[in-house]
Image (cartoon, grey):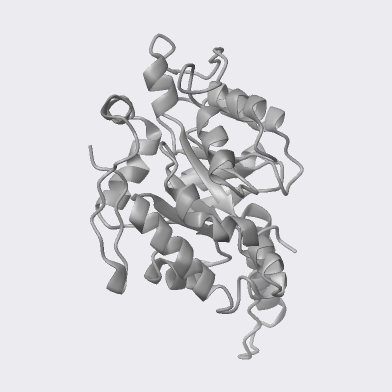
């Protein structure tokens, strides 16, 4: 089965999976995450929304809006892994893929979310291939992993360990200078679905202003290094952006899993623009408000 492929301008490629076993790939068929793979195989990006408000209602809004995936943030938000697991356990089968960013690379946290029905896990602060291998192993059962058995999500294939493991995609974040130095080896870890760039932390690590990470071209060179590593290992490249304009720029550079912004950021932008428009009826001066400076609505 074809693994996520992508194309973007001069970087056009058709990628075939070389990491996951054929059996696990087959088991992933018809899972929610498979819908994202189909987009990538068609050279189209998967576009996501991001929940940082701690609101399960916001999760449903993103799903109804037609996003290709929805992310729940347990690292930079008020939500914990326990909260995310509760939301996932209430999610009906066949809905929009839900991906959770955990607060740290922890086997218990990752396993709990996989058991609750997460379609993907994003793991922050991964610096070495060993870190990445531990993240992948957290969704797989022995002897190939360290996950404990205990699925609780609705509609999970509880009688098939391979299918339980294959349905959860693992993405790791490149956010430090050490990780950037090791990016080729990290991308080559078997079973890894992709790399998700953390623009703010990566900027800090490289001596750049994190508040310009989403509004400037300061990360083009490191992004290209990460893109090349992903392409060489046939995995997907993703990242946070703040709005459609920023998303288009990074898609053109090779990103294929692109978060458009957070619930709080989008609410702030939309609310400010509507309020400004209402207060200036008859005034032809533009009063639009740009998206927040970070994905967290501040």
Q: Nearer the viewer, residue 222 or 263?
A: 222
Identified at 25% across, 46% down, the residue is 16
Residue 140, above or below 79: above
Q: Quadrant of residue 110?
A: top right
190 lies left or right of 153: left
Identified at 34% across, 34% down, the residue is 20
Identified at 73% across, 35% down, the residue is 80
Q: Percent position (x, y) of residue 206?
A: 67, 70
Identified at 56% across, 39% down, the residue is 130
Which quarter of the figure is the C terminus placed in? bottom right
Q: Nearer the viewer, residue 94 or 156?
A: 156
Which quarter of the figure is the N terminus placed in? top left
Residue 111, above or below 191: above
Q: Answer whether residue 258 is visible to the viewer in this image.
A: no
Q: Percent position (x, y) of residue 217?
A: 55, 79
Q: Quadrant of residue 169?
A: top left
Q: Answer whether residue 10 is visible to the viewer in this image.
A: yes
Q: Nearer the viewer, residue 163 or 96?
A: 163
Seen from this angle, which residue lies furthest top? Answer: 159
Q: Percent position (x, y) of residue 233?
A: 36, 51
| Number of numbered tags placed on the structure image | 0
Q: Quadrant of residue 296?
A: bottom right
Q: Percent position (x, y) of residue 90?
A: 57, 24
246 lies left or right of 202: left
Q: Nearer the viewer, residue 110 or 284?
A: 110
């Amino acid at each position: 089965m074809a693994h996520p492929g992508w194309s973007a301008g001069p970087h056009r490629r058709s990628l075939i999976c070389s990491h996951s076993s054929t059996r696990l790939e087959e088991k992933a068929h018809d899972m929610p995450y498979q819908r994202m793979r189909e987009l990538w195989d068609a050279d189209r990006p998967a576009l996501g929304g991001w929940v940082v408000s701690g609101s399960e209602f916001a999760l449903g809004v993103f799903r109804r809006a037609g996003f290709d995936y929805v992310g729940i943030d347990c690292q930079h938000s008020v939500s914990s892994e326990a909260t995310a697991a509760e939301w996932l356990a209430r999610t009906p089968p066949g809905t929009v893929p839900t991906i959770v960013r955990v607060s740290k690379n922890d086997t218990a946290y990752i396993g709990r979310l996989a058991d609750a029905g997460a379609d993907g896990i994003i793991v922050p602060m991964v610096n070495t291939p060993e870190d990445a291998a531990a993240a992948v192993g957290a969704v797989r059962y022995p002897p190939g992993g360290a996950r404990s058995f205990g699925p609780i999500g609705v509609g999970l294939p509880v009688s098939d360990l391979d299918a339980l493991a294959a349905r959860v995609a693992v993405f790791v974040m490149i956010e430090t200078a050490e990780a950037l130095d090791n990016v080729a080896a990290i991308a080559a870890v078997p079973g890894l679905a992709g790399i998700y760039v953390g623009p703010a932390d990566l900027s800090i690590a490289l001596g750049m202003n994190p508040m310009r990470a989403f509004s400037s071209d300061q990360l083009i060179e490191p992004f290209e290094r990460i893109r090349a590593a992903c392409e060489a290992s046939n995995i997907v490249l993703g990242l946070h952006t703040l709005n459609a304009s920023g998303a288009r720029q990074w898609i053109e550079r090779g990103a294929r899993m692109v978060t458009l912004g957070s619930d709080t950021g989008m609410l702030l932008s939309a609310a400010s623009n509507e309020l400004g428009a209402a207060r200036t009826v008859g005034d032809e001066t533009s009063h639009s408000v740009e998206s927040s400076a970070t994905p967290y609505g501040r």
